[in-house]
Amino acid sequence: MLVAFSGGTDSALLVRVAADLLGERAAALTALSPTLPEDELAEARAFAKEVGIRHLLLPSREMENPDFVRNPEDRCYFCKSELFRLCRQEADRLGLRWVLDGTQKDDLGDHRPGLRAAEEEGVRSPFLELGMGKKEVRGLSRMLGLPTWNKPSMACLSSRFPTGMEITLERLRRVEECERFLREHGFRQIRVRLQNGDARVELSPGEMQRLFESDVRRRFVARCKDLGFERVTLDLEGYPEREGS
């Protein structure tokens, strides 16, 4: 089997189990894309090396697809179509029968156009087939001692754009830099969303107060403005309690 591996909690568990059960008959594929933060890529590479699975890193070309760049409501379909095309291509090349992804039952509550892409390419989702949700995935990951068991949910950087706002490399870079600043200062659950010319920050409710401690707020605002944002706002409702958005 070949696992579509983003580096997140769900696909990391699949990678570990595939490596344990199948050895050389398993592989993981991570798509190299501007929508994947560099920090996430580094963690995915380290994890794959730790569990000893063959790890493929291949460029993804969704940014060359105008249907993806224009950012319609089903944007995720075009991204996942490219990912699963790559996975199927490499699985066939390596003589691997199945392509797997980490979709689990809690994902069904969100708008997930990528599920259609998975179905079209014959991708299987073991957690979904077993009726497993995020709680079970995290529990098994913790039992196996995986460092990803309590990793904050992460979605590709294009999810920070409102529908209809064109996805550009420059905008992706700005969002990535702002989120990196916050992570380097100890924040865990973060989204910096584009809203007109502003950066709208979502943090978990328990982390909001920390933003106002010492000079973090002032330095963060200055960094965002250096990157071209007109204003920086904080969503007082906090990061919504759902995975993957």
Image (spheres, rainbow, N blue to C red):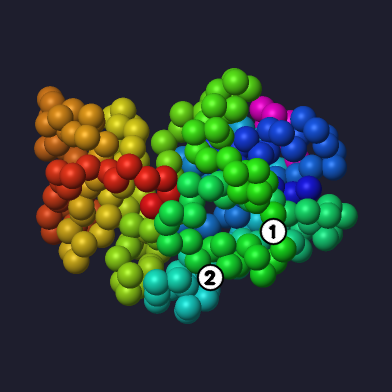
State which quadrant residue 31 falls in.
bottom right
- Graded by Cα atoms within 10 Å as few (under 14), some (14 to 19) or many (20 or more), the crowding at tag 1 reads many
The boundaries of the magenta stretch are: 49-54
Q: Which residue is pictured at 12% across the width and 31% down the height?
A: 212
Q: Which residue is pictured at 33% across the width and 70% down the height?
A: 163
Apparent side of residue 202 relative to residue 23 in the rendered image (left or right): left
| SS of the residue under disc 1 | loop
The picture places residue 176, in percent across and down from the top left corner, at: 36, 49
State which quadrant residue 84 falls in.
bottom right
> On the image, numbered disc 1 is attached to which residue?
123
Magenta highlight on residue 72: no
The picture places residue 217, in percent across and down from the top left corner, at: 14, 36
Circle 1: residue type: Val
Apparent side of residue 1 relative to residue 169 in the rendered image (left or right): right
Circle 2: residue type: Phe
Apparent side of residue 136 relative to residue 200 in the rendered image (left or right): right
> On the image, numbered disc 2 is attached to which residue?
78
> In this figure, what is the number of numbered marks?
2
Compared with 59, 29 (above or below) is above
Apparent side of residue 171 relative to residue 131 in the rendered image (left or right): left
The picture places residue 38, in percent across and down from the top left corner, at: 47, 45
| SS of the residue under disc 2 | helix
